[in-house]
Amino acid sequence: MRTSGVNQKGRGSQQFSVLAGPAAPPSTSVAPRTRPAAPRTRPAASPSTPPQSTPLIRLEDVAITYEGAEQPVLSGVNLDIFRGEAVLFLGPSGCGKSTLALLCAGLIPRAVEGQVTGQVWRHAELERSGGIGYVFQDPDTQFCMLQVDDELAFGLENLCIPNPDMGMHMDAALARVELSSYKQARHEHFSGGMKQKLAIATALAMSPGMLVLDEPTANLDPLSTQQVFQQIVRLRQQGQTLLVIEHKFEALVPWMDRVVLFNREGQVVFSGPIRETLAAHWSWLVAQGVVSPWQEWTDVDKVDQKTVSLQGPSLSGRLPEEALAAFSLRNGELRYGLQAVWTGVSLDIPKGSFTAIVGPNGSGKSSLLQVLSGLQRLTSGTVEAYGRTLKDWKTNERAQLLSYCFQNPEYQFIYERVGDELANRVVGKEIPADVTQLLIEFGLEKLSQQSPFSLSQGEKRRLSVAAMLRESHQAYVLDEPTFGQDARTQQTIMDKMKSLNEAGSTIVMSTHDMDLVRQFASHVLVLIPGKLRFAGTPQELFAQPEVMREAHLLAEKTLTQDFEQFPSSHGLEQIAQQETSSGEWGTVATQVRRGFTQRLNPPWHLLFTLGAIGVALGAHTLPQALAVFLLPVGLMFTAARLGPIQVVKRLSPFLGFYILYVWTMTAYAKVSPGTPVFRILWMHLSFPGLILGLILALRMLATVSFGLLLISSTDITKLVVGLSQNFHVPPKFAYGTLAGIRFAPLFQSEWGKLRQARQLRGKDSRWRVMRPITYALPLLTQAVRMSERVACAMEARGFFGRPADLSQGRTYYRIVRIHWWDFAYGIGLMATVTGLLLWIH
Amino acid sequence: MKWKLRDIVLAVIFSVACGAIYMGWDWLDNLVFGTWSPALQGIVNGMWWIASGLVAYIIRRPGAALFAGVASAFFEFAFGSPYGAGALISGLVQGAGAEAGLMMGGWRRYNVWMMMLSGAVGGVGNTLQWLFQYQGIHYTFSTQMGYFVLTVISGALLAGLLAKAVADALYRSGTLNNFAIAKQRRVQGQ
């Protein structure tokens, strides 16, 4: 469709009237189209009484240099943003768009360090906390709480909104993004689109003067993307000042006022009314790699034709004649725990085909790729690769047969230098010729001595693809290889894969980009949650809009104001149910049961538990130890209302551990002279030692039971928030901790993926215990990046200064109260332990 | 020297990772070493306060070693360590030890020797807990001395040297540019 109708209408056409067309509120429809002849005086001097033409933000000759970098990312930037305006930032990846947005939002240099030169002026209404909302690219690293309501409340607390008023603000914000029925939900189960909408809601709750959306749809499937876009349109209509960064910008064009174009060197090259500017500089955008060469500038009026031309010509006649399957799956079923990812999947991927796997977020595309590559075992069913059951392939044979490219390139990195990484061994400065060739081909030649982790996202992706293509394989399996890339990188990668495919290799990739499917794929598989919905050629798929719609693949290029016809929350609920995290670590302190202990004040409960454990250390005889063990077990049944099976289940894994302790005491305890001992090797087994060991084991069981009692009756959010409210721990520490806890389940999945990536490269340590050491670097790099993002997102929601430093500097949504029974229970507990010890003396 | 929010979040996320490692270490330590000799157990102990060294070396704030020690122990506990809530006490005493080591350098010096000292003093905390909570006092004096010496050495090597090596590798990858470790080096480099 993009090849249809070369339309250069925009070029040289007259000024358009107000682009917002439908229903921009009258008060804000006067968004200036060009930079006004603004007063040249330094506005910073008098920000108090803004006249109508005063911008919300004014930048003059701004340059930004990151810490440790020699070159500025951005320089010579002049920009005004006016009230009610919707501005689009466009440029190749790594050009500094996000950096400028962060500066506009005041997050540089406060949350992200950087040297800023030049003049930055912000209107007073933006300078207040929460005055500029910011929605980040990655849905997972911008939240810091576990539940939707807490998440919204976090910003309100920072603004010191009184507790009784919070509900109103939260409801209003949720209603604006159509998530009203999810107020009590845990957002880890949300789909990517819902998470982004929630992120928008958290910003809206703080009534921002301006909202920044920094590639909000980069991680989303077409439908979720459209949901977010619809949201943007709605905000535009409500007169919200918007700053949007978006690669897939086409559908947004009618709703944006102005576009700012960046070049690779981090300069603002053009800025002006969006249609005229895009039309005039389209070939420049192609040259910069912002849009693909096959994309043509089409004015929005032509959009209807575009949608219709979905069935347009695609690559045909390239269907492989060989009917043999490279991969075939029969009655495949995959489950994570009780959760079925998909069932009853039977498919054949022909040899020499270019097969694309598409479908909504969370439909199990990655899992399917992993099953085909032998990284993931089917729950039931069979999978064959090249006529042989996959189980029969040895690991190294499989590694020669196929290569696999992970969504996150970092999983694959093993070495400290790009050159080594590509050569798959340490080569240092003497890089072999074939590696040099690849480096040049992928534009990495200047980076060969750098750390793979220090590259930009685009460079990392190119490196991982290059490393994967270095050796020839019969099949290449790629998980969203073009994810988050600008047009130029995308082009490099796709061209390479196309040539491999033409040389006879089978390519299987997952993607959200239907343009790529149209352009490159010979076959396409459509997964929807739970099953395989379609298998065939792209032409056949495009001829079946109902399948496309069901699989969230239809993202119309036109965004409507008619929200009614838009698929609403029903579909989303399904996704939410589908996307449950499988991590067992996810259960950290979250299973709250009904019982008296649940009503205790969590921080005090923690303190008294530690106190009780301390007193229990006084158990020096077997009966004493038994008593202090039975006490918390009894409490688990009565006060925490845990069932006996639960208790046994939770305690039993440690039995072997305590037996070891008993053994060590028995074999090595100091014995008084004359005690009979049994000597073997250098050990001396004794009866008193055995008793000491049993006492120790029982004491440890008591400790574990006290801990279990605490964990099973404590809500982690309440514990952490309570630390601030009741003990005046600076909120920075309390909420920072809570934000970090969210990542526990994430680590588990990262670990699994790392292991797979290593196995594929034949580089996994043979010793399990060595894995923490070899995995440390990629895992910790990821951890550092997550912490920076989360911290930045928290500060973007007003978490700095008083609300972050002082427990009295903020209001609280959850009031964690202290009652008399907290002390009654705590002191009673410690007294009981003491009493038991004295009584059983 | 005020803590930045990203310092805190980094400390917590690293503590989550370390807490998971501790879980595995709980078993390794007892199965492989404890069975053969309680003293020999000491030689791997240092891993249990590596979070203190790692985090303190990166963010370089007073209190970082203690905070990371307690936080990582909390996660170890929450993930279901066989030491249960006893892990919290370990985190407290080992973290306090590591912190005391760094305090001796005025929280300014973070060279090899300071890191090893910090790791070693963490071992003192560990030994104290072992003596009183885990029946250490019921072993012979030579076993106790063996445990103490090996634990201190292990702390210096694992929680000091290894932590430093990991953090330095991380620094070389360029991901720590926004943290005190990189800033101090830039200042020193000039």
Image: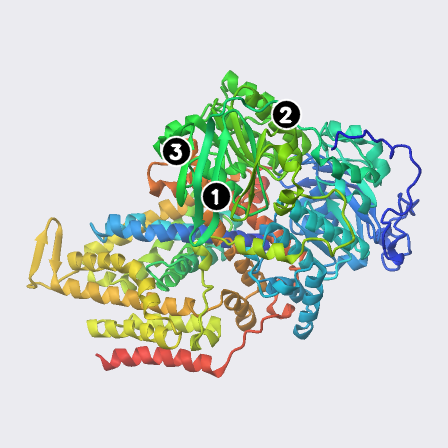
Disc 3 residue type? Leu
* Position in image of residue A603 (x %, y %): 48, 71
Classed neighbour count for the residue bearing mark 3: other residues with Cα under 10 Å, few (<14), some (14–19), many (≥20): many
Question: Which chain letter matches label 1?
Answer: A
Residues under numbered marks 2 and 3 in contact, where contact means CB atoms less than 8 Å apart: no
* Position in image of residue A54 (x %, y %): 88, 52
Q: CA distance from mark 3 to mark 1?
A: 29 Å
Mark 1 falls on what kind of element? helix
Give the number of the disc on residue A316: 2
Q: Is residue A834 left or right of residue A269?
A: left
Report the mark closest to the observer, 3 or 1. 3
Q: Which residue does the image show at 69% across and 51% down from the upper left?
A: A227
What residue does disc 1 label? A779
Say which of A398 and B157 sits in front: A398
Disc 1 residue type? Leu
State whether residue A113 appears in this view: no
Say which of A764 and A248 sits in front: A248
Question: Which chain letter matches label 3?
Answer: A
- Nearer-N-terminus badge (3/1): 3
- Nearer-N-terminus badge (2/3): 2
Are discs 2 and 3 both within one chain? yes
